[in-house]
Amino acid sequence: GKYRVVSTKSMPGTRWINLLVEQDCRLEICTQKKTILSVEDIISLIGNKCDGVIGQLTEDWGETLFSALSRAGGKAFSNMAVGYNNVDVNAANKYGVAVGNTPGVLTETTAELAASLSLSAARRIVEADNFMRAGLYDGWLPHLFVGNLLKGQTVGVIGAGRIGSAYARMMVEGFKMNLIYYDLYQATRLEKFVTAYGQFLKANGEQPVTWKRASSMEEVLREADVISLHPILDKTTYHLINKERLAMMKKEAILVNCSRGPVIHEVALVEHLKANPMFRVGLDVFEDEPYMKPGLADMKNAIVVPHIASASKWTREGMATLAALNVLGKIKGYPVWSDTNRVEPFLDEKSRPPA
Ligand code: GLV
Ligand code: GLV
């Protein structure tokens, strides 16, 4: 191979490997056993000749790595993730390194996990499972693990981009929930879908579903029964859900986060879960991954899973393939499939959480 491409992790499937190897690349996959590579680990992987790198969201792609990559002759980096808060795109630009991410292939998989967490929280699946395994079930009772019926309730979506809209659609269509969403941009297709589905239900003599585009995030927090967070993480969404905003939510609301951990002030969340036993949360991401803030693991009203929202076989193979195509594209002069050239702030100034 003419080009040296490094992948900091082994990734699912073989298509991404074949793509690179068939097109003049010598691929080197890091075999280090440790889960999270340090900047120093990656510098030594890059070495003194490297044309492109496929990296992971656990890695800190800043000034140091992009200058090392540039010195090694590298022109391309792709995150194997749609989120790229771990990547300093300005630093990459400065060193002439193109940055790619992997949108699209994980939309439905991620939305499905958010839906799973919503349902699991509503029906207290994890608590009930633990109860069974502990041998505590001694017969059916009218009060046993009573949860809430989603039908007719309101689902709130904060950030109605690809994933947020897919999730909204699943909850509206699958469970006949009404929708309220907040986004700087109008989710026109989603609105049309809910309108059409509402008309369909009405024509069948059922209660139609409704939608509303909220004029503030607080409106969603106050009105929704199930709230799912789908913003990108940047300085405008850091600690978006804090003590004050948790207090605005219904006492029995369900909050789901499959975006990035720091969007929630996790210490405030633990306090809120302690004070409000009927408030439930489903978390795929954590403020300080892989750690949880003290007390979270003891809360029965929390469901916690280890950042697996994109973890379906089809999606992970797709992400690996897209990441390889991103790097290959830059090396070979094809267009790079990326969001990173049109980064928009998610929130306006007035919606920013107080510093
Ligand atoms: C996963 O968290 C991703 O951003 O793809
Ligand atoms: C519950 O199992 C019922 O039959 O209502």
Image (cartoon, grey):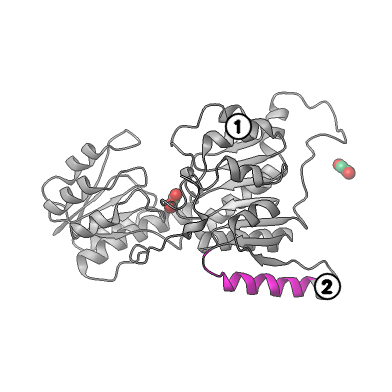
**Residue 224 in sight in this render:** no
- In the displayed structure, does residue 237 sit left or right of residue 100? right
Q: Which residue is mark 1?
A: 271
Query: Of 83 and 106, which appears nearest the observer?
Result: 83
Q: Earlier in the sequence, mark 1 or mark 2?
A: 2
**Does mark 1 have its CB less than 8 Å from ligand 1?**
no
Q: Position of residue 82 (x, y in %)?
A: 41, 56
Q: Position of residue 267 (x, y in %)?
A: 53, 33
- Marks 1 & 2, CB-CB < 8 Å contact: no
Work out whether 302 lies above or below 100.
Answer: above
Residue 229 is at least partly visible in this image: yes
The image quadrant that residue 172 belongs to is bottom right
Discs 1/2, front? 1
Q: Write the residue at 67% across / 43% down.
A: 120
Q: Residue at x 72, y 59 (%)?
A: 177
Query: Type of residue at label 2?
Result: Asn
Boundaries of the magenta span: 184-201
Q: Looking at this view, is 295 or 100 the one in front?
A: 295
Q: Quadrant of residue 147?
A: top right
Rate crowding at label 1 as few (under 14), some (14 to 19) or many (20 or more) other CA atoms within 10 Å: few
* Residue visible at 20% across and 45% down in the picture: 64
Question: What SS does tag 2 mark?
Answer: loop
How far across and how far down the image is residue 194, in percent? 68, 70
Tell me the quarter of the picture where residue 338 sits: bottom left
Q: Quadrant of ligand 2?
A: top right
Q: Which residue is tagged 2?
A: 204
Residue 188 position, x and y percent, is 58, 73
